[in-house]
Amino acid sequence: MLWTDCLTRLRQELSDNVFAMWIRPLVAEETTDSLRLYAPNPYWTRYIQEHHLELISILVEQLSEGRIRQVEILVDSRPGAILSPAEQPATTTAALSSTPVVPQRVKKEVVEPAATQSNKILNSKKRLLNPLFTFSLFVEGRSNQMAAETCRKVLTQLGASQHNPLFLYGPTGLGKTHLMQAVGNALLQAKPNARVMYMTAESFVQDFVSSLQKGKVEEFKKNCRSLDLLLVDDIHLLAGKEASLVEFFYTFNALLDESKQIILTSDRYPKELTELDPRLVSRFSWGLSVGVEPPDIETRIEILLKKAENSGVDLPRNCALFIAQQVVANVRELEGALNKVVAIARFKGSQIDLDVVRESLKDVLAIRARTISVENIQRVVSEYFRIPLKELIGPKRTRIYARPRQLAMGLARELTGDSFPEIGMAFGGRDHSTVMHACEKVQSLKQEDPIFNEDYKNLLRLLQS
């Protein structure tokens, strides 16, 4: 039959997920010159109209050899119509015949008011907020200070256009989730009745698909669009999820129209999310985008000391310094290193000292010795700026060589933990005061010169990847 042949072609044209979720459940009714497709709800029909109706019309006209030139999509209003692919597979006109419906025995329940049901759903979402993710437990440093200050400001001006949406971006494990949830926890503490929802992009997709299968799309939309604060983690993971992207687009716009606050996180700057719908990416830039960078060594030390204190562990500062020098990528790796040190110390029944730390991190030290060294940093910086390695290390003080040399020294101090004299020797036997000046210059240029800061971050990513 015509619709069966059309399904075969559509299966070839569309992804398996799209075909199974959106196309297969449709019911078709064929007349002499038209084809009617029936979907279970208005949202479904709108999605088919916007994304697939043109392709279906072309295929139907081809397969019918021009006999059918009109294809329309309608809502199937019959009781129990196509709730999910499993419940109602795609079929043809026979499914639309007046088949008597056998009533099912349903347990009588007391129906709660809609507002109460909605609050119950939101309250279940509130429990997803980690109570330890607060501003008081967040360790600030140069790498995350602007992001932390912005999140605090959001609390005082919730929904203000200058930072709505607030888009936090940066590599994984740097505290973006901690900051966004700190806003949610602080808001709920100040206003217990505030409607706050935290979810990852993946859980948004799962909840939306579940609502489609259960015929509860309108309830899902109402819950998402009646919030005071929406927190969505790893928004880049919506890539490739066509239907969910459409729904998130409408939810996003609805909340912005009502001046409700949205906070998003991603591993990249908004304009780098080329796999997402350009309309959505442009809206991400309407508010404020703030980067979170890997913590510097001082911040890493404070993070270790604070986490040890919160866990009731006595961590000497010289041990925290040693761990911070060896683990530079992100906060999660710092936590993992600290946990391993604590476990080894307890197993041995001893206090934490440098010997215990070295034994605990021997695998990390071995890997680090093979991957990040001053020589490796020099090679990567020379290739990045396309200057000869001998000039990077050499005596010339022209700006084209001096600035990359300072940057390489700063990276060496940041990533290797080598002393100033050791780094100076690796750069042509320079004095330790020269290296100190270079490191100070790097820190100031990161704040003052956006291009230099971007180069620094790019090199950091290259060396840590």
Image (cartoon, rainbow, N blue to C red):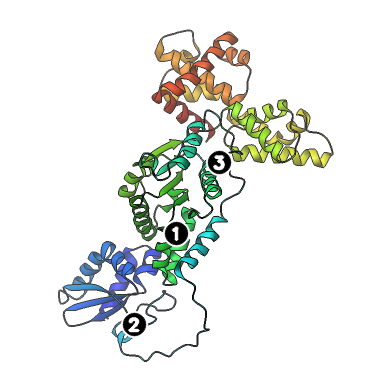
- Front position in the image: 166 or 317: 166
**Which label sits on residue 436?**
none
Give the quarter of the image for residue 340.
top right
Q: What quarter of the picture does the N terminus occupy?
A: bottom left
Question: Closer to the camera, 239 or 366?
Answer: 239
* Residue 313 at x, y percent in the picture: 75, 37
Amino acid type assigned to the residue bearing label 1 in the image? Val
Distance in Å between CA atoms under marks 2 and 1: 28 Å
In the displayed structure, 49 sits above or below 423; it is below
Q: Secondary structure at mark 3?
A: loop
Q: Residues within 10 Å of mark 2 (few under 14, many from 20)?
A: few
Q: Is residue 161 visible?
A: yes
| Badge nearest the viewer, 2 or 1 | 2
Which residue has dot 2 on it? 78
- For this orientation, the residue located farthest to the right is 349
Q: Amino acid at mark 2?
A: Arg
Closer-to-camera residue (50/378): 50
> Which residue was labeled with disc 3?
173
**Picture coordinates of residue 332, whole percent (x, y):** 60, 41
C-alpha gap between disc 3 and disc 2? 50 Å
Tag 2 secondary structure: loop
- Does label 3 or label 2 sit earlier along the sequence? 2
Q: Which mark is residue 205?
A: 1
- Determine whether 351 is above or below 259 in the image: above
Q: Amino acid at mark 3?
A: Gly
Question: How far apart are labels 1 and 3 at the CA level?
Answer: 23 Å
Instruction: For label 1, count other residues whose C-alpha is less than 10 Å away and answer few (under 14), some (14-19) or many (20+).
Output: many
Q: Nearer the viewer, mark 3 or mark 2?
A: 2
Pick whichever of labels 1 and 3 is earlier in the sequence. 3
Earlier residue among tags 2 and 1: 2
Residue depicted at x 60% and y 25%: 416
